[in-house]
Amino acid sequence: MPKLKVLSGEEILEIFSQFDFKIISQKGSHVKLRRTLNNGTKQTLTIPLHKELDKGTLKAIFRQALRYIPEEKLRPLFYGENS
């Protein structure tokens, strides 16, 4: 079974930039990302810019992002054989 990768906040930003999320604000070490769909719907995620994110934090970000991005596209970016 694939394991959750060890990712930094910067790596998470790169992942979500592939899905057209842009940085809209930052407060302390947390960055707010947003993308606006063609119908005007806004989708927002908040990412901590830590050097290494805790497993629970990564899982929470993954679950929140599943509201906006299909699991088959997102899972390979968060889970892999090498952790």
Image: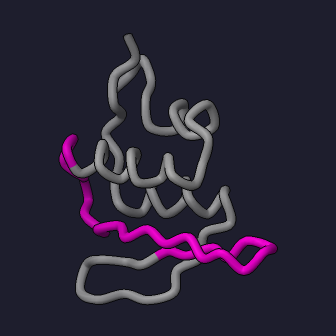
Report x, y in % for residue 12. 44, 56
Report x, y in % for residue 80. 45, 24
Residue in the image at 60% along x and 76% along y = 42
Report x, y in % for residue 9. 35, 61
Residue 74 quadrant? top right
In the picture as drawn, the residue positioned furthest to the right comes out as 38
Q: Is residue 34 left or right of residue 48?
A: right
State which quarter of the image contains the N terminus.
Answer: top left
Above or below for 66 versus 20: above
Above or below for 57 versus 9: above
Above or below for 41 versus 2: below
State which quarter of the image contains the C terminus.
Answer: top left
Q: Nearer the viewer, residue 42 or 51?
A: 42
In the picture as drawn, the residue positioned furthest to the top comes out as 1
Residue in the image at 33% along x and 30% along y = 4
**What kind of colouring is applied to the model shown?**
one colour
Q: How many numbered callouts?
A: 0
User: Is-magenta flag for residue 51?
Assistant: yes
Residue 20 quadrant? bottom right
Task: Tell me where the magenta segment starts and ends, as one range.
Answer: 33-56
Report x, y in % for residue 3. 34, 22
Residue in the image at 29% along x and 49% along y = 60
Q: Is residue 69 left or right of residue 79?
A: right
User: Is-magenta flag for residue 57?
Assistant: no
Above or below for 8 versus 48: above
